[in-house]
Image (tube, helix red, strand yellow):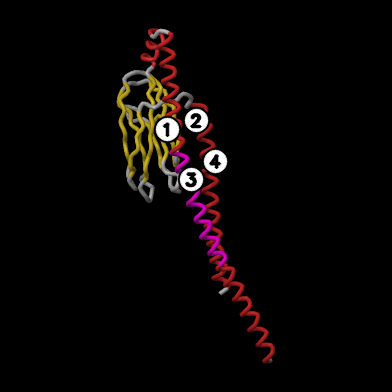
Amino acid sequence: MISIIFLLFGLIQGQDDNVINYAEEDKQDRKDLMQEWELMMQDFIPDDMIAFELKQGNMEILLEGIHHPTTIRGAYFISMTTKEKINFLIKDPKGNIISSKAAKKEAVFSVNITEPGDYQFLFDNEGGSSDQIVTFALDIHNATYEHIKHHDLDPLMKQIQHLQNGINDIMFETKFSQQRRESGYESMQTTHQRLFYFSIFETVIIILVSVWQVYYIKSIIDNRRLI
């Protein structure tokens, strides 16, 4: 009986530790992400932003044709309610990996492109145990186009373009942050619910142990009286 009780306590403690470890790991990942965002994603305005389903055990490949040297920046994230993570790769036209993110719920990237061609963006859920919804945003900076705009537009048009870029930037950051907050809120609810159930289970076990101890001590006292 005692060994079973200790085993149950061990299982409960292990579950609690896992929940805490997952929460701490997610917190550190978000901290690292914000640092990368500050370094690489200033004035990030995506050309495309999509959401798609990444099936369990599958890999999804998105193709993007890039025709001139440039810089590509982007970000992706999956639901914060899941404990699972996905892998992300970028391959150049020759199939070489030029950027990768291993086991991340969310990540950002900035890559300098020197060779024109079709680039692959790979989302890997082959090791996962459930389907995931991936939100992906991509910005391809057109250096030539930006250079022409800068020299050809009059001051008023430049100000209008600057305001438009600022509004687009705010809209994207608001949308991206809102989705991340909603996912984070759902994750917190799930974690609190699990902790609540674990607490109830622990309370029940403690009550059972207390009752068993009372019964055991009472039986010892009764046996001594008979002797």
Judging by the rendered image, the residue that carries numbered circle 1 is 75
In the rendered image, the quadrant that contains the N terminus is bottom right
Q: Amino acid at mark 3?
A: Tyr
Judging by the rendered image, the residue that carries numbered circle 4 is 28
On the picture, is 59 further left or further right than 10? left
**99 w.r.t. 160: above or below:** below
Q: Amino acid at mark 2?
A: Trp
Question: Which sits earlier in the primary sequence, circle 2 or circle 3?
Answer: 2
Q: CA distance from mark 2 to mark 3?
A: 21 Å
Query: Secondary structure beneath disc 3?
Result: helix
- Which residue appears at 47% of the width and 47% of the height? 187
Q: Which residues are magenta?
A: 179-203
Judging by the rendered image, the residue that carries numbered circle 2 is 37
Question: Which sits earlier in the primary sequence, circle 4 or circle 1?
Answer: 4
**Are discs 1 and 2 less than 8 Å apart at CB?**
yes
On the picture, is 81 further left or further right than 23? left
Question: Which dot, 3 or 1, sits closer to the camera?
Answer: 3
Q: CA distance from mark 2 to mark 4?
A: 14 Å
Residue 157 or 144: which is nearer the viewer?
A: 157
Query: Secondary structure beneath disc 1?
Result: strand
Q: Name the disc covering residue 185, or none.
A: 3
